[in-house]
Amino acid sequence: MEANDYALLFAPMDQETKGNGIWDTYLGPKAKVQVNVSDRTIKEIGDQIGEKKYGNALFVKAQQVRARGGARRGVPCAMRTGA
């Protein structure tokens, strides 16, 4: 849901603020409510955030993985837990 809202943002400052919030809440190493997406996807998103490469499609891959019911078979996943 939040990733859908993020995709509608166009102002770079808004993308950075919302993107960092999503990262901190759901994907980052200290996330309070971690979601089950592949380590590769998390790394790609983390690298983009680290390089300040925010864009409307930043979380699309993670959304696609979640829509299919989790990480792809054969792709390592970090241990994820819900709150």
Image (cartoon, rainbow, N blue to C red):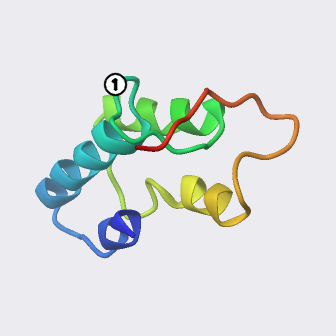
Name the foreground residue: 63 vs 79.
79
Left or right, residue 24 beside residue 66: left
Task: Find the residue positioned furthest to the left.
Answer: 13
Q: Quadrant of residue 75?
A: top right
Question: Percent x, y for residue 44?
Answer: 53, 35
Q: Quadrant of residue 1?
A: bottom left
Q: Quadrant of residue 40?
A: top right
Q: Look at 33% across and 36% down and name the residue there.
A: 32
**Is the residue marked by circle 1 packed among few (<14), some (14-19), or many (20+) residues within 10 Å?**
few
Q: Is residue 34 above or below residue 2?
A: above
Left or right, residue 45 beside residue 74: left
**Type of amino acid under label 1:** Lys
Task: Find the residue positioned furthest to the right.
Answer: 74
Q: Look at 35% across and 57% down and name the residue there.
A: 55
Task: Find the residue positioned furthest to the top.
Answer: 29
Question: Percent x, y for residue 54?
Answer: 32, 50
Question: Percent x, y for residue 49?
Answer: 34, 37
Q: Is residue 56 above or below residue 39?
A: below
Q: Look at 31% across and 72% down and name the residue there.
A: 5
Numbered disc total: 1
Circle 1 residue: 30
Question: Percent x, y for residue 23?
Answer: 34, 41
Q: Look at 66% across and 37% down and name the residue there.
A: 38
Q: Is residue 56 above or below residue 77?
A: below
Task: Find the residue positioned furthest to the front.
Answer: 83
Q: Quadrant of the C terminus?
A: top left
Secondary structure at numbered mark 1 = loop
